[in-house]
Amino acid sequence: MKDLKVAFYVTGGIAVYKSISLMREFIKMGADVQVAMTPSATEFVSPLTFQVLSKHAVHIDTFSEEDPHYVQHIHLADWADVSIVAPATANTIAKLANGMADNFVTSALLATVSPIFLVPAMNEHMLEHPATQKNIETLRNRHHYVMEPETGFLAEGYSGKGRFPETEAIIEALEGFLMEFRENLPLKGKKVVVTAGGTKERIDPVRFISNDSSGKMGHALAEAAWSAGAEVTLITVSDLPSRKQINRIQIDSAAQMYEAVNQAFQEIDVLIMAAAVSDYAPLKVEEHKMKKQNQLTIELKKNPDILKEMGKKKTKQFLIGFAAETENIETYALKKLTEKNADLIVANDVGKKDRGFNSNHNEVTIYSDINQPVTIKLSKKAEIAQSIIEILIERLE
Ligand code: C5P
């Protein structure tokens, strides 16, 4: 659960009070939890309880869009690594099974593509009603995990099936579900190395040569590869965050990047060189801060071409390179494909202000050694990364 982003959906049943302990346990285990409640759930427990414990505002009203940057229910759906509905009432289960979206919770769930885990809790007769049973079956066929409620003392004052299970049982089932979900992902068992950012080539203790690359594309690729089930190592110059499940190696120079890539290379299946590697580094790194002078010449030496070197060494490894150009993009991309022995070259025009270096968006054309080029129109870098990983998955198959 450590660093897992959990969308926690609370629907209106008496078991709401138990879901507070469940949510607290997730937080204790290191998860980041955001809560959304149906209006009925708020009749049982105040949203303030969940807000104080989760340290996030609780979502209830689909139309109270306070932050104009986001549509909240879509944002929560996209943000979550996993969505948990606890307790899940017969009503919300029915709506989810039938694709209804009439409140914040059902709208967000309908927009969710990551795994959904439900903990039904209700009266025994409601649970056993053929409509509820059919809806649960529909959700299971859709690969949602629907926990089996426990048998015991119900709020109605008699014993029956429908109780909200104990926190430990829910966590055990959830961990099993998440593990199984990752087992079935397309890049399961694949080791992927991604490089990111513009390398920094030291001149003296306070100065370096670098470029405009932010590392956003590389970090998005590492995240997309992880989401597809790969074991990911991210060799990065950037300060951008990356999830704990990604093995991160922080470096500065092209020489350090070469070392790190070279050391991992034998063992890996895929290398994605998204980094903007500086072609040159100062021949000599000054030990002390250089003093001002009228004219200054810094002698540069050529850096290793990491992708090209790995291209020479490759056996089973699939190599993806990038081509950041301001002119003749196709010609240069095709040249790199053969010269560097790469399997794919992702080419982008870095001469435009609204895309490429440092931007959140990009437009790329992917050149392949065997297929026709594919252009991905101007989109968010996360979406581009997703498309590149999809092409990678197709090629690995
Ligand atoms: O040759 P050019 O720099 O245009 O090629 C870009 C591709 O090669 C990128 O994938 C980049 O990460 C990689 N590269 C490298 N080592 C270098 C320069 C670029 O691996 N020294």
Image: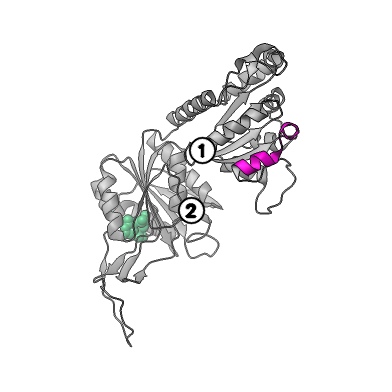
Q: Give how far across and how far down residue 390 sits, in percent.
A: 46, 40
- Residue for point 31% across, 61% down: 253
Label 2 residue SS: strand
Q: Give how far across and how far down residue 287 sits, in percent.
A: 25, 73
Spatial CA distance of label 2 from label 1 is: 42 Å
Q: Residues within 10 Å of mark 2 (few under 14, many from 20)?
A: many
Q: Where does the magenta region start and end?
A: 38-53
> Image check: 94 left or right of 335?
right
Does mark 2 have its CB less than 8 Å from ligand 1? no
Q: Give how far across and how far down residue 316 sits, in percent.
A: 28, 39
Q: Quadrant of residue 196?
A: bottom left
Q: Image height check: is 307 above or below 283?
A: above
Q: Nearer the viewer, residue 97 or 179?
A: 179
Judge whether residue 159 is colored magenta: no
Kind of residue indicated by mark 2: Val
Q: Image height check: is 157 above or below 352?
A: above
Numbered tag placed on residue 346 in the rendering? none
Colouring: one colour
Farthest top residue in view: 159
Q: Quadrant of residue 89?
A: top right
Judge whether residue 48 is colored magenta: yes
Numbered tag placed on residue 364 in the rendering? 2
> Image check: 273 left or right of 25?
left
List the residue tagged with mark 1.
Answer: 28
